Every structure is written in C-alpha cells, then in structure tokens.
Amino acid sequence: QVQLVESGGGLVQAGGSLRLSCAASRSIFSNSVMGWYRQAPGKQRELVATISISGNTNVADSVKGRLTILRDNAKNTAYLQMNSLKPDDTAVYCCKAALRSAWGTVSDYWGQGTQVTVSS
C-alpha cells in the first residue's frame, strides 16, 4: 500500500514561515512527480507546486516567490517551504505522488493532508 506521510502544518502568524514535509517509500518516490495541492474552506482544490524527478519545478503564480517546492531523493521526501505567509494561504495542504510505471501509465497517490492556518 502506498503511503505518503505529511507533517509540518500548524498555526502561524501572517508573515511567518512553515515547512511541510511529505515522506514516501523509496520505490514510489524515485519514480514520481511530487506535488503539493491545497483546499481552502468553500473552495476547490488547487495546485500549489510540482517537482519532477530531475528537480524541475512548476509553481502557481499566486504563490510564486513565497512558496518553494523541494525534494530530497536521498530521504525520499518532498518539502514545501512557505515564507511570507498570508491569511489567504490558510488551507488543508495535501501531497501527491504521480507514479509512472515501467509501461508509462501514471497513478496518483495522496497523503492525508495537513492543516495550515495563517492568522492576521
């Protein structure tokens, strides 16, 4: 069973920083594009950022310059470094592994989500 274990959420004041972590098994992580998504109350889930196996990143314009996605292939862990947080960043943040098989098919696996609350 694929497991993604997230950690690092919490309550922070506006302007503060948090770092989210998403740990996966090696067999999954090494063959996956990793991504962070978020869903605020009453809103649809949105993409925050993705990072390829080779380290290429794609970051949503709304968070560019403040949120950074990273991956440590030795630790099988993806990170979301969040700086200059705003109340609008308040959401449940979920990690996703897009696993590519040897046959080229892609399967998505999700973490359980971690709450980030930014107070004004």
Image (cartoon, helix red, strand yellow):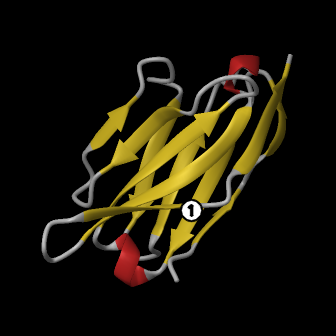
- Tell me where residue 71 sits by quadrant: bottom left
**Along the line of sight, which residue is nearer the eye, 34 or 102?**
102
- Tell me where residue 76 sits by quadrant: bottom left
**Along the line of sight, which residue is nearer the eye, 25 or 105?**
105
Q: Is residue 119 shown above or below 78? A: above
Residue 86 showing in the rendered view? yes
Which residue is at 64% across, 34% downward? 39
Q: Position of residue 32 (x, y in %)?
A: 32, 64
Which residue is at 76% across, 19% downward? 87
Compared across the picture, whether 80 is left or right of 6 comes to: left
Q: Position of residue 31 (x, y in %)?
A: 28, 71
Q: Secondary structure at mark 1?
A: strand
What residue occupies the far left of the structure in this picture?
A: 103
Which residue is at 51% across, 23% downward? 63
Q: Is residue 86 shown above or below 118? A: above
Q: Dot 1: within a 10 Å radius of its alpha carbon, few (fewer than 14), some, or many (20 or more) residues?
A: many
Residue 17 showing in the rendered view? no
Q: Is residue 73 shown above or below 120? A: below
Q: Which residue is mark 1?
A: 22
Compared across the picture, whether 22 is left or right of 55 comes to: right
Name the amino acid, label 1.
Cys
Q: Position of residue 6 (x, y in %)?
A: 65, 61
**Along the line of sight, which residue is nearer the eye, 16 or 87?**
87
Q: Position of residue 88 (x, y in %)?
A: 70, 18
Compared across the picture, whether 102 is left or right of 114 comes to: left
Which residue is at 31% across, 73% downward? 30
Q: How many marks?
A: 1
Compared across the picture, whether 111 is left or right of 78 comes to: right
Locate the C terminus by quadrant: top right
